[in-house]
Every structure is written in structure tokens, then in C-alpha cells.
């Protein structure tokens, strides 16, 4: 798109004739056209490396926004399924961490608050200091939980896909974050309202400030992740041990078809690096956790292909997996493309004749010993001995039992050609260079 074409000359001439541009602009247009015409091939060649360089070093958020139009919607990836999965995960996290926060507040107010008030009355003569200490301890204890259900799933694959897939999704996604922030502020507001006599406006400001500190604190983030992992590990330790012993069956037993898996279909491009490889070499199961159910090849269908099945251009492979796995395969197929061959025209095969002279190094050698194929990357397709038709070549390996008859050596019933006569015209199938 950088090249200024000849149509610019017409525009510039029209501008000069109408008097809307000055005389100096027309030479500038011509000069720019010449320069951009010269630079266009180099810019086209450098476009792909520049694109890869920018994707490698740009921040991930910028790169995602730049490429979301090109990536588009992965095949068989339903927005409804993404919304359903995301809302379910957010609701579950909010419910779990909300229960933990409420339980922590209840324990602190019922057990710790009376003790703090008693100590505060003995030391200062009032209970406000005890209320402040208990409130701070309570907020510190529930801070990892509040941060978790406000920030968790905001960087998930479902959230990112919905955000970049369509601008219409962004307002509902921001609304989900706002709702969870309001729930977190409600917990802080309740603590302040229970322990202090501040006005509602002041308590709202305090709650917003405290929640902002929770979200921005990296230490709080690490603590939240550590507590979550420890909680899940302790929660599932007995279930995992029971499954290992065989006394407890998996939760998905009898409900496998209810899980979020389905069949996706992907077409292999003609320049894909998958072409010529077997399913065993592609390792789709190890890389993506998916299963290839069928391969559609023209009017034929290969059901349950084996690992030695070779992938051809234009094949449509049907893969079983969930939305995330199918999206990963779709993106990989688009990215794993063989680079364009810029020198394809230079490797065109041509036919050429070479006359052997007395000083030719090929005289007295068989085709195998001459090195025509190995050293010069040429193929001898015939020998012209002045006959009506070119003598076809039948190459055989030489051995000790051989004799020459009219320029050909025989070995059993097979024969192979050696360059014995001066003046042979050998026809080569070779490259232009």
C-alpha cells in the first residue's frame, strides 16, 4: 500500500490545471512515485519479518489488539459457550470467596472483637481502639479473598477472546467487573459501618481506597494465589487420595457426554507445514489433548485414522476437544505455514544437450562414476548417437563382471550406459543455472 502509482500523475495534472496546487508539487509526486516503486519489492519482502519482530517484542496486550482482526473467530468456537463458561466461573468464585469472607468476618466479630474491646477499655478507657484494631485485622484477613473474586478470570482465555472478538462484548465484560467490585465494597462498607460512626460518604470513600490498594498490591496478589492453591489442595486432598486408592470414582463418570467437548473441522492449507507428516509426527494429542476422529479427503472419509496416516493439502480433519483446545489447533494451523519460495522460478527444469569432446572428464566413466547426478544435480535422460531416436538410459550398478558392446556394458540381463564415445550428445534435465 506504500507505492504511489501512475494515477497520482493524473491527480497532480488535474490539480495543476485547476490551479489548486502549485507547480512544485508535480515533480514531488513523480519523485515519490519513482522512489516508492523502487522500494515496494523490498518492503514486501521485509513485511513478514517485521511483523514477526513486532509480535515478539510488543506487549502482549498491544499485539492482541493488533492481530485480533486477522485472527478472527476460531472455527467452531461459540460465543455463547464462552459466555456461559466465563459467567459460571465468575459466579462460582464470587460465591466461594464471599462465603469465606463472611465466615472470617463472623469469627472476628464474635471471638476477637470482644477481646479487643476489653483490652482497649482497660488501656484507654473506651472501645474504639479495639474496634479499629479488629477492623484492620479483619480487612487484612479477607483482603486475599476480596481481591480474588474481583480480579480472577479477568485475564482468562475466555475473557480475552470475548474482548477482542467483538466490541459489543466489552461493555458486558466491564459490567461483570463492576458488579464484583460492588460486592467487595459491600464487605468493606459493612465492617466500617459496624465498627465506626463515620458517615456513609466517608465509609464509601474508605472502602474504595482500601479495595484499590488490594487490587494494586503485588504482595496481596501473591498471597491470594498462595492461599487459593493451599485451600484447593487441602479441599481435594481426601478426594485425590480416595481416587488413587480406587475407592472413589471420577466425578464425570456417567456424564462424559455432558462435558464441554465437541467435534471441530479444520482444512489444511496448501502451504501448511503439516503436509507430508503423519498424525504420529504431528502429535496432536500430546500438544493439544485432542483426538482426530476423521479425515475428509475429496469424496472419501477416513474414520479413526491411525498414526501412520499422512496429511495431504486440502484435507479436512475432524478433531474432538473443548473450545480452548479447538481454538489452539485453529491458531496453530494458521501460523504453521511454510515460507513463500521467492526463487521458485530459478529452479525451473529445462532440457539441454552437451557434446562430449575427447578431453571431457566423463569419457570412460559410467553415469554413476561420472557424478553428473551427485555433483552437478543433473539427470541424463538420453544419448544422441546420430540415430533417428534418442537412446534411453537404463542405469545399473557396475561390477567386476562387465564387458563393452557398442558403447554399452552388460551385466546379466540389465545394462547401463557409460560415456565411451567422443561426440555423444547427452540430453540433461537440469536447472537453468
Image (cartoon, rainbow, N blue to C red):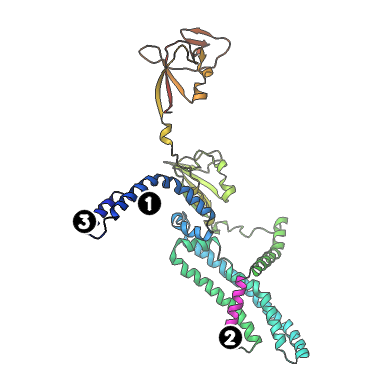
The residue wearing badge 3 is 17
Q: Position of residue 171 (x, y in %)?
A: 46, 70
The residue wearing badge 2 is 202
User: Quadrant of the image for the C terminus?
Assistant: top left
Q: Is residue 93 left or right of residue 68?
A: right
- Asked if residue 383 is among those painted magenta in the image, a careful observer would answer no
Give the mark nearest the N terminus, 3 or 1: 1
| SS class, disc 3 | helix
| SS class, disc 1 | loop
Question: Which residue occupies the extreme left position in the image?
Answer: 17
Would residue 103 be seen by someone viewing this image from the given angle? no
Q: Residue at x 49, y 24 (%)?
A: 376
- Give the number of the mark in front: 3 or 2: 3
The foreground one among 235 and 208 is 208
The foreground one among 242 and 232 is 232
The foreground one among 393 and 345 is 345
What's the CA distance linking mark 1 and mark 2? 58 Å
Q: Tell me if mark 3 has few (under 14), some (14-19) or many (20+) residues whose alpha carbon lies within 10 angstroms of its own.
A: few
Give the magenta range. Answer: 199-217
Q: Tell me if mark 1 has few (under 14), some (14-19) or many (20+) residues whose alpha carbon lies within 10 angstroms of its own.
A: few
Q: Residue at x 46, y 48 (%)?
A: 48
Q: Position of residue 404 (x, y in %)?
A: 50, 8
Give the mark nearest the N terminus, 1 or 2: 1
Label annotation for residue 2: 1
Amino acid at each position: 500500500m506504500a507505492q504511489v502509482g501512475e494515477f497520482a500523475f493524473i491527480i497532480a495534472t488535474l490539480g495543476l490545471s485547476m490551479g489548486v496546487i502549485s507547480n512544485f508539487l508535480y515533480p514531488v509526486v513523480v519523485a515519490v512515485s519513482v522512489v516508492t516503486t523502487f522500494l515496494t519489492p523490498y518492503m514486501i519482502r521485509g513485511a513478514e519479518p517485521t511483523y514477526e519482530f513486532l509480535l515478539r517484542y510488543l506487549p502482549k496486550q498491544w499485539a492482541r489488539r493488533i492481530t485480533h482482526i486477522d485472527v478472527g473467530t476460531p472455527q467452531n468456537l461459540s460465543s455463547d459457550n464462552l459466555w456461559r463458561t466465563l459467567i459460571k466461573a465468575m459466579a462460582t468464585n464470587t460465591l466461594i470467596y464471599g462465603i469465606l469472607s463472611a465466615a472470617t468476618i463472623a469469627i472476628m466479630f464474635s471471638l476477637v472483637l470482644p477481646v479487643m474491646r476489653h483490652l482497649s477499655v482497660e488501656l484507654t478507657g473506651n472501645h474504639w481502639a479495639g474496634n479499629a484494631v479488629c477492623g484492620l485485622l479483619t480487612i487484612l484477613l479477607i483482603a486475599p479473598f476480596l481481591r480474588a473474586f474481583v480480579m480472577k478470570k479477568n485475564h482468562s482465555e475466555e475473557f480475552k477472546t470475548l474482548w477482542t472478538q467483538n466490541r459489543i462484548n466489552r461493555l458486558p465484560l466491564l459490567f461483570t467487573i463492576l458488579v464484583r467490585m460492588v460486592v467487595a465494597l459491600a464487605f468493606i462498607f459493612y465492617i466500617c459501618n459496624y465498627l465506626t460512626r463515620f458517615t456513609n460518604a466517608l465509609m464509601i470513600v474508605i472502602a474504595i481506597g482500601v479495595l484499590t490498594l488490594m487490587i494494586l498490591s503485588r504482595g496481596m496478589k501473591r498471597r491470594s494465589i498462595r492461599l487459593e492453591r493451599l485451600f484447593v489442595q487441602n479441599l481435594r486432598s481426601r478426594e485425590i487420595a480416595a481416587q488413587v486408592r480406587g475407592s472413589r470414582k471420577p466425578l464425570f463418570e456417567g456424564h462424559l457426554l455432558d462435558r464441554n467437548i465437541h467435534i471441530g473441522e479444520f482444512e489444511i492449507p496448501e502451504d501448511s507445514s503439516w503436509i507430508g507428516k503423519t498424525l504420529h509426527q504431528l502429535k496432536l494429542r500430546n500438544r493439544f489433548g485432542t483426538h482426530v476422529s476423521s479425515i475428509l479427503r475429496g469424496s472419501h472419509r477416513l474414520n479413526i485414522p491411525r498414526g501412520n496416516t499422512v496429511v495431504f493439502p486440502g484435507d479436512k480433519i475432524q478433531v474432538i476437544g473443548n473450545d480452548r483446545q479447538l481454538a489452539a489447533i485453529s491458531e496453530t494451523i494458521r501460523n504453521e505455514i511454510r515460507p513463500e519460495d521467492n526463487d521458485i522460478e530459478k529452479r525451473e527444469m529445462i532440457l539441454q544437450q552437451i557434446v562430449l569432446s575427447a578431453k571431457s572428464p566423463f569419457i570412460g566413466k559410467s553415469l554413476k562414476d561420472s557424478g553428473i547426478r551427485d555433483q552437478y544435480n543433473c539427470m541424463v535422460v538420453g544419448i544422441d548417437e546420430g540415430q533417428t531416436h534418442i537412446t534411453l538410459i537404463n542405469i545399473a550398478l557396475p561390477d567386476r563382471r562387465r564387458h563393452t558392446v557398442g558403447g554399452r556394458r552388460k551385466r546379466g540381463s540389465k545394462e547401463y550406459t557409460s560415456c565411451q564415445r567422443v561426440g555423444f550428445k547427452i540430453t540433461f534435465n537440469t536447472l537453468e543455472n
